[in-house]
Image (cartoon, rainbow, N blue to C red):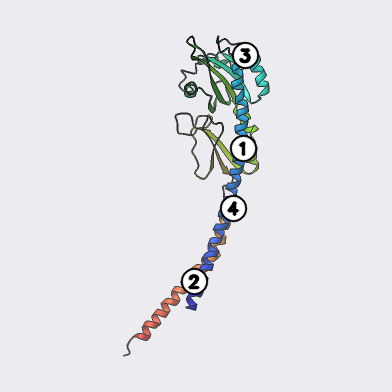
Amino acid sequence: MRSIRLQAFIAGGMLLLLLLPICVMKNIEHQRRYEARDIAQAFAFRLTARFNEAAGAVYLVSVAVDRRSGQINRFDEVAEELLGEFPLLRALELAPGGVIRHVYPIRGNEVIIGHDLLVDKTRNREVHLAHARRQMTVAGPLALRQGGTGVLARYPLYQAGSDGRPRFWGLSIGVIDYPGLIQSAGDSEFERRGFNYQICWIPIGETQCKEASGEPVALDDRAISLKIGPAQADWRLLVTRRDGWLSRFEILLMLLAMLPPAILLGRWVWHTVRATSVADADSNSSSAPAG
């Protein structure tokens, strides 16, 4: 009985030594994932706050529209002031009837004048949704027609019809500078702490997460994934560690640390089996009938 207990103790100790490096590395990986999630959540909070600040100008620029007559007054003056207050804005637009007619600044944005948002099948889903829900919608980050990458915040405007019921007037639109947005949210913290990140968005009516270029993103199962950004959009933040959650060197160290106890455990099992076989052979020979 004592021999069996001793063997069990030895086997348990060797197995513990074998599993210890794995437990240590798993704990290191867990700590790094926790750190990455902590950084990601702080980044997501700042990003949402910066976006909401800039998107507020989309509501404010609507004061340039007379809700009774539908006339536009002092748009350039109001937009210029708002762009000075909200530096993340690239442009402000008004689109009566869904057609962009007024843009500030006009320089660099000439190409979008006359763009009918209601008939553009590549960009009109968020516009129709804004009209249907009577609330702001967000599209992007995406490649802009006027160049660069931005986020489009569109707010539907209504005026009183002849019957007293609200009638769709058009849209007030804000173009938010996407590179400036993520920079203001502190994306450099990821690089400083040794992490890589990627942001993609799922357009309305779709299931595939896309980059700003429109290319689909292959989601990494091992990445930290968070839903971030404004409530009106479906953005995903993916975070990975630059050298992997465990580097190749660390994995090699783990395997080297497992090697001695694995060899000892193997030798012990071999000797135990051999000793048992010899004992069984001796027992059989002693119990065999003589001559």
**Of the numbered discs in the image, which one, if any, rests on residue 43?**
1
Marks 2 and 3 close (CB-CB < 8 Å): no
**As shown in the figure, which amino acid type bears the numbered disc 1?**
Phe
For residue 90, above or below residue 238 = above
At label 3, counting other C-alpha atoms closer than 10 Å, the crowd grade (few under 14, some 14-19, many 20 or more) is many
User: Does dot 1 land on a helix, a strand or a loop?
Assistant: helix
193 up-or-down from 93: above or below: below
Give the spatial CA distance, label 1 vs label 2: 51 Å
**Circle 1/circle 2 CB separation < 8 Å:** no
Which amino acid type is marked by label 3? Phe
- The relative height of residue 62 versus residue 215 in the rendered view (above or below) is above
What secondary structure is found at the residue carrying circle 3? helix
Q: Quadrant of the C terminus?
A: bottom left
Q: Secondary structure at mark 2?
A: helix
Asked whether residue 50 is in view, the answer is yes
Amino acid bearing label 4: Ile
Between residue 15 and residue 40, name the one nearer to us. 40
Left or right of 163 in this view: 246: right
Residue linked to disc 2? 8
Secondary structure beneath label 4? helix
Residue 225: image location, x then y, percent: 53, 41
Q: Earlier in the sequence, mark 2 or mark 3?
A: 2
Q: Is residue 213 left or right of residue 64?
A: left
* Residue 281 occupies quadrant: bottom left
The residue sitting at 53% across, 63% down in the picture is: 18
In three-dimensional space, the C-alpha distance between marks 2 and 3, rounded to whole angstroms, equals 84 Å
Residue at position x 49%, y 71% in the image: 8
Residue position for label 3: 75
For the point 62% across and 42% down, which residue is it? 39
Q: Which residue is mark 4?
A: 28
Label 3 with label 1: CB-CB less than 8 Å: no
**Cα distance between the residues tagged 2 and 4:** 30 Å
